[in-house]
Image (cartoon, grey):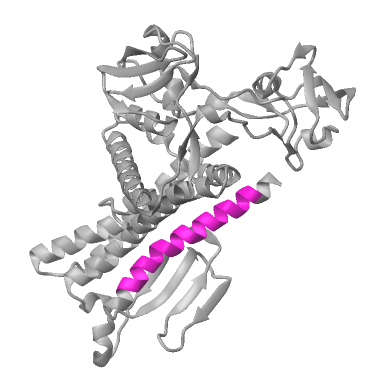
Amino acid sequence: MPILTYTFSFLFAVLVLVLIHESGHFLVARLFKVKVERFSIGFGKPFYTWKNKKSGTKYALAPILLGGYVKLLDTRETKISSPNQHLAFDHKPILQRMAIILAGPMANIIFAFFALWLMFLIGFKLPKPIIGKIIPNSIASHANMRSGEKIITIDKHKTNNWEEVIIAMLARLGNTDYLSITTQSSPKLETKNYQLNLINWNIDSYEPNPLKDFGIVRYTPPVPPIINNISWNSPASKSGLQKNDRIISIDGQPVNNWEDFIDLIKKSPEKQINLLLKRDGKTINLTTTTGWKFGPKWKKVGFLGVGSLPIAWPDQMLREYKYTMWPAFSKAWHKTGLFVDLNKIIFDKLFTGKLSFRVLGGPISIFAASGQALGQGFTMFLGFLAIISLSIALINLLPLPGLDGGYVILLLIEAITHRPISIRIQTLILRLGIILMVTLFLQVTINDLMRFF
């Protein structure tokens, strides 16, 4: 069942990435002989604990998997005898404390690099950036772009796949000049250059998709309208639809591919529809009632709760990425830098107001993305883990209260003033950070609800 795949992939991703982050703090703390009182994956009342009698560290697994923490011995919080004060975090030199704090994000960055290295070593394929359709009255249509062309450069940067196209576009978000796109058309391999006016380019916060907002729809081979899976307790599960049913028409309107099928269903929320389908060589009429969910801008759209067959890509439309050990190392290094740059661009756009916080995704987005990535294979799931791991690292490095970057700022202030910041002030700052984090969490969760429900 897809829900089991999504749940497993989400829990696995959270456990692995939180474990890596907290292990970074833990290992460097142990390296500098700081006593670790507690190592917890998750928050809330733990359902599993184990205490290492030799080190005195208590390990815990808690139900709220939104992160974790490492609790270090600190004389400002716990009274301890003089012989043991050398084990306290606050009694260590500033550089050692800073190294312990930065070790979490660094562990995430190192993991991301090696995940990408393994990804390039195993090999994977990505679709070439071939335009499937240009949306009328869009930025791309006003520039006279055409479907069927392959995007080969954006602002003179090579674009071998859609990921590179989107990164190049996001780098220009908020600008009001022109974006230069060079395309190549088959079969004569003629190149054309288009100048896209950015003055009216805005990301749709309900459906953040830079390509669609430009008016570009990527080409995907048509998927036949065959039911591949049915969600539990969905309208489809109660209708008599079965796996491998091929949809011929809906209310007399012909269905040629999966896109036709989904479009017709979306237009019919909470409506009785007549399906003509083929099952085991026989033509069958079936009547069912669609469900509904919120689409973009809280508009009701219909749904049945069925999944399609995987996209069957012709080899000539795919680009393979597979390298030996050292070239894979180089590619992983470059890709890590690319993702870091992309995150920096997004943070810059968010904090300068060029990008709305409503485009951010929360736990539901990660849940969906993890399941989709695992469904595409192990290498794609590795790439997903790398991207999320880098995002965790960079978010934690932001100089905000409650984050690792915020603690680094406090240590820098201590180094400049030669006086430790009182625990009372640190507690106030931490509470402010918690308020900010809860506010952001609520915002991204609302964003998710508006997209998925």
**Nearer to us in this view, 106 or 435:** 106
Q: Is residue 173 visible?
A: no
**Nearer to us in this view, 15 or 196:** 196
Relative to 288, is 395 above or below?
below
Q: What residue is drawn where x is 29% and y is 77%?
A: 31
**Nearer to us in this view, 409 or 155:** 155
Relative to 10, is 290 above or below?
above
Q: Quick check: 386 left or right of 157?
A: right
Query: What segment is highlighted magenta in the picture?
Result: 5-28
Q: What residue is drawn where x is 30% and y is 87%?
A: 80
Residue 217 picture location, percent across and down: 49, 20
Q: Is residue 419 visible?
A: yes
Relative to 330, is 267 above or below?
above
Residue 127 picture location, percent across and down: 49, 31
Q: Quadrant of residue 75?
A: bottom left
Q: Is residue 27 magenta?
A: yes
Q: Main secondary structure of the magenta part?
A: helix
Q: Quadrant of residue 87?
A: bottom left
Q: Quick check: 108 left or right of 49?
A: left
Q: What residue is drawn where x is 49% and y is 63%?
A: 42
Quarter placement of the C terminus: top right
Relative to 321, is 225 above or below?
above
Residue 291 picture location, percent across and down: 73, 30
Q: What residue is drawn where x is 31% and y is 44%?
A: 334
How many marks are shown on the rendered structure? 0
Q: Quadrant of residue 275?
A: top right
Residue 398 picture location, percent across and down: 28, 50
**Nearer to us in this view, 215 or 347:** 215
Q: Quick check: 135 left or right of 338?
A: right
Q: Is residue 348 magenta?
A: no
